Image (tube, helix red, strand yellow):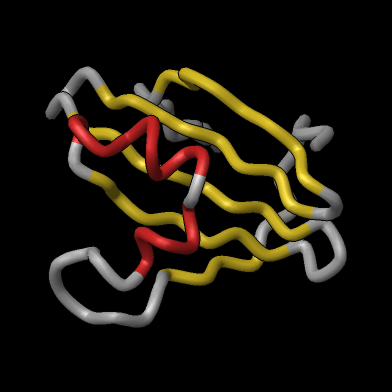
Amino acid sequence: MTTTAATSTRRELASRVNGDLAITLFWDPRDDSTSIDIYHATTDETISFRVPPDRALDAFHHPFAHLDKRPGPRAPRLTASTNPGRNP
């Protein structure tokens, strides 16, 4: 049996920890998109959302202010994650 691991092309541009939140800014060279992940250590949940590249740094510093400005559905994507190898 062969298992193929999904390879992410996202590149981490910046990360910071504030209390039990780890905020990470990513860039994906496949489509030149930027996104923010907010990992909540207490609940082991991650909120991920895309941000326009020209607003990426501001979203990194003020991620919750950008949740309501996203196009499309207003609810963020919540993913329970085990975050292997991640030590926020």
Q: Residue at (20%, 32%) from the top-left corner?
A: 53
Percent across and percent down for residue 64 are: 49, 62
Whether residue 73 sits left or right of residue 61 in the image: it is left
Task: Please name whichever residue, 88 or 65, is drawn nearer the observer in this view of the structure.
Answer: 65
Whether residue 79 sits left or right of residue 66 in the image: it is right
Name the image quarter holding residue 81: bottom right
Name the image quarter holding residue 18: top right
88 over 38 or under it: above or below: above
84 over 71 or under it: above or below: above
Percent across and percent down for residue 65 are: 42, 62
70 over 6 or under it: above or below: below
Whether residue 52 sits left or right of residue 39 in the image: it is left
Q: Residue at (62%, 28%) from the top-left corner?
A: 15
Percent across and percent down for residue 69 are: 24, 66
Task: Please name whichever residue, 43 or 23, is drawn nearer the observer in this view of the structure.
Answer: 23
Q: Residue at (76%, 34%) from the top-left corner?
A: 86
**Total marks drawn?**
0
Q: Residue at (37%, 66%) from the top-left corner?
A: 67
Q: Quadrant of the N terminus?
A: top right
Q: Quadrant of the C terminus?
A: top right
